[in-house]
Amino acid sequence: MTMLTRGADGLLELHAAELPQKDELCGCFWATLALRLNGEEPIEQDDVALVAGSVITSHGSVHLLPLGQEGRNDYRLELPVTGDDASSGTSAHGVALAVSELTDGRLAACPVSGLDVAGVRAVLRAAAEATAPVVLIANVQTGAFWGSHASASQVAAYLERGALDAGPEPDWSVGHFVALIGLSEGRAGALVTVADTYPVLGAGGVHLQPVEAVAAALEGRGVLVVAEAEVARRVADVAGGLAELWDNGSPLPGVRGQPAGAG
């Protein structure tokens, strides 16, 4: 059985039109699409970045991109710049703040951290059953993922036998923001549909990941449930976990010069 988060069809249309993300703004990419999905126009990645306190590097981030992906630096606004990779990116706190401020509180980005496999399943089911569009922005460590071009036989081995080790090696290993948009359950395994910010990953930026890999990628991080405020709270409550924002190492809004990590 396959279920999609409420509004996933519209989100994927917006996703295809916006790819790829602007360099170092992966969290802002997803917040932008979540706001557009909920009727907030015009809104650009830079608008979100300015409120979120995002910091970009002076030398660019080509060395952090997936193999074969070109960067994108067509910024509309002047953003804070650092010469240090470790002081760049966007924090989960910043994404949540931008969602609230740019919609005057109409939308919320409710945090859920500490999710295990059951929690990942629960948040996807709750987002599928929601009464309004929900965007699940997941802050992940991509080194825990399968490679994004799993073959049909690898997918079948996992779904039928739970062969978690059947999948390909990860494409890259960085801190990153993606969207979780669906859950497909087999006899032994369950695959999460992940929408990414780079078209070289998967099929046009969409790939499948074992639910166990998603839970591992979320370790020490979490998911922002973005929706109308009351809907977001209900989905987050059903997911369980901790209703706490996490530190992904990136600078907090209004704070400069602190250690950070990849967006």
Image (cartoon, helix red, strand yellow):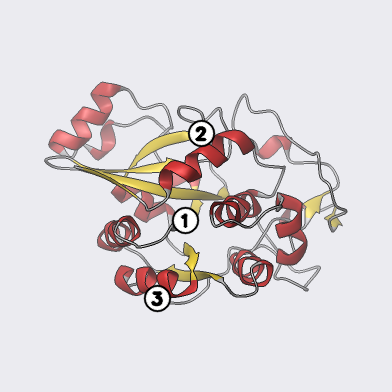
Q: CA distance from mark 1 to mark 3?
A: 18 Å
Which callout, 2 or 3, points at the residue further toward the start of the chain?
A: 2
Q: Report the front residue among 259 and 30.
A: 30
**In terms of secondary structure, where does tag 3 sit?**
loop
Residue at the disc numbered 1 = 135
Residue at the disc numbered 2 = 205
Q: Amino acid at mark 2?
A: Gly
> Looking at the image, which residue is at 54% across and 52% down?
37
Q: CA distance from mark 1 to mark 2?
A: 16 Å
Where residue 242 is drawn, which disc sits there?
Answer: 3
Q: Is residue 230 left or right of residue 213?
A: right
Q: Are marks 2 and 3 in contact (CB under 8 Å)?
A: no
Which callout, 1 or 2, points at the residue further toward the start of the chain?
A: 1
Query: Which quadrant holds the N terminus?
Result: top left
Q: Are marks 1 and 2 in contact (CB under 8 Å)?
A: no
Q: Amino acid at mark 3?
A: Leu
Crowding near the residue tagged with mark 1, few <14, some 14–19, many ≥20 C-alpha atoms within 10 Å: many
Q: Quadrant of residue 14?
A: top right
